[in-house]
Image (cartoon, rainbow, N blue to C red):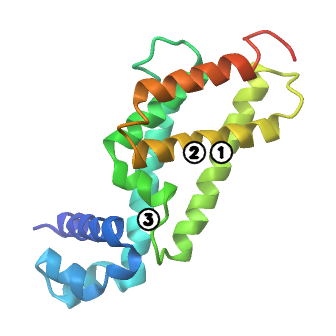
């Protein structure tokens, strides 16, 4: 196995352990045993356990960022031309395609290292900034775009968490219908000014 493939295998195994049981369960011995390697090979690849965790967080943060960008830039699978609804539908697709990635950030596991919390804070700020920018573009005279973006972010996060924890009830159709209802009844129509 190439060094890069071995590295991905170790990260996949670490992620599976963390997703199921938390960071505290991902010990060097357990990871090495599950990967069929020795601890020295593990340390050659990552230096130490913190190095494995940072590499995992980096990989999953990059994956989530790419999926978020795709959801925003390439909305599809919705008949609604509204960019807010298209973006939310894209976020649901991202969660459905890689639920373990999104659980890492929407439900940080027990024993998560500080790096995960730092990345989480950065990504949340980036999403809120994006929402605020989009609100200002669509509704230039919106009374408080910063707090409106915060409310949209918190609401969207809650709905995406429901999609992860209760997909049988938090169906795509139900979530999109709710977001469409909120969009129609909370934010003004395009061109309307509050």
Tell me the residue that label 3 is attached to: 57
Spot occupied by residue 176 in the image (x, y as percentages of width and height): 50, 25
Q: Are marks 3 and 1 in contact (CB under 8 Å)?
A: no
- Check disc 1 and report its element: helix, strand or loop: helix
Quote the CA–CA distance across marks 1 and 2: 5 Å
- Check disc 2 and report its element: helix, strand or loop: helix
Tell me the residue that label 1 is attached to: 154
Number of marks in picture: 3
- Of the numbered discs 3 and 2, the one sitting upstream in the chain is 3
Mark 3 or mark 1, which is nearer to you? Answer: 1
Spot occupied by residue 117 in the image (x, y as percentages of width and height): 57, 67
Name the one closer to the observer, 50 or 157. 157
- Check disc 3 and report its element: helix, strand or loop: helix
Quadrant of the image occupied by residue 92: top left
Tell me the residue that label 2 is attached to: 157
Say which quadrant the N terminus sits in.
bottom left
Q: State whether residue 62 is above or below residue 151.
A: below
- Of the numbered discs 3 and 1, the one sitting upstream in the chain is 3
């Amino acid at each position: 196995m190439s060094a890069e493939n071995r590295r991905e295998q170790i990260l996949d195994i670490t992620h599976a352990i963390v997703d199921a049981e938390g960071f505290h369960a991902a010990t060097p011995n357990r990871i090495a045993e599950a990967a069929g390697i020795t601890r020295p090979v593990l340390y050659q690849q990552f230096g130490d356990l913190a190095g494995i965790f940072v590499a995992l967080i980096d990989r999953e943060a990059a994956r989530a960022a790419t999926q978020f960008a795709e959801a925003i830039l390439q909305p599809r699978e919705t008949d609604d031309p509204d960019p807010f609804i298209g973006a939310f539908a894209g976020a649901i697709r991202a969660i459905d395609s890689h639920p373990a990635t999104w659980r890492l950030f929407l439900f940080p596991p027990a024993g998560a290292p500080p790096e995960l919390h730092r990345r989480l804070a950065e990504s949340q700020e980036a999403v809120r900034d994006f929402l605020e920018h989009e609100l200002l573009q669509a509704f230039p005279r919106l009374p408080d775009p910063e707090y409106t973006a915060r409310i949209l972010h918190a609401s969207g996060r809650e709905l995406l968490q429901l999609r992860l924890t209760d997909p049988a009830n938090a169906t795509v159709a139900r979530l999109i219908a709710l977001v469409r209802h909120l969009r129609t009844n909370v934010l003004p129509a395009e061109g309307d000014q509050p």
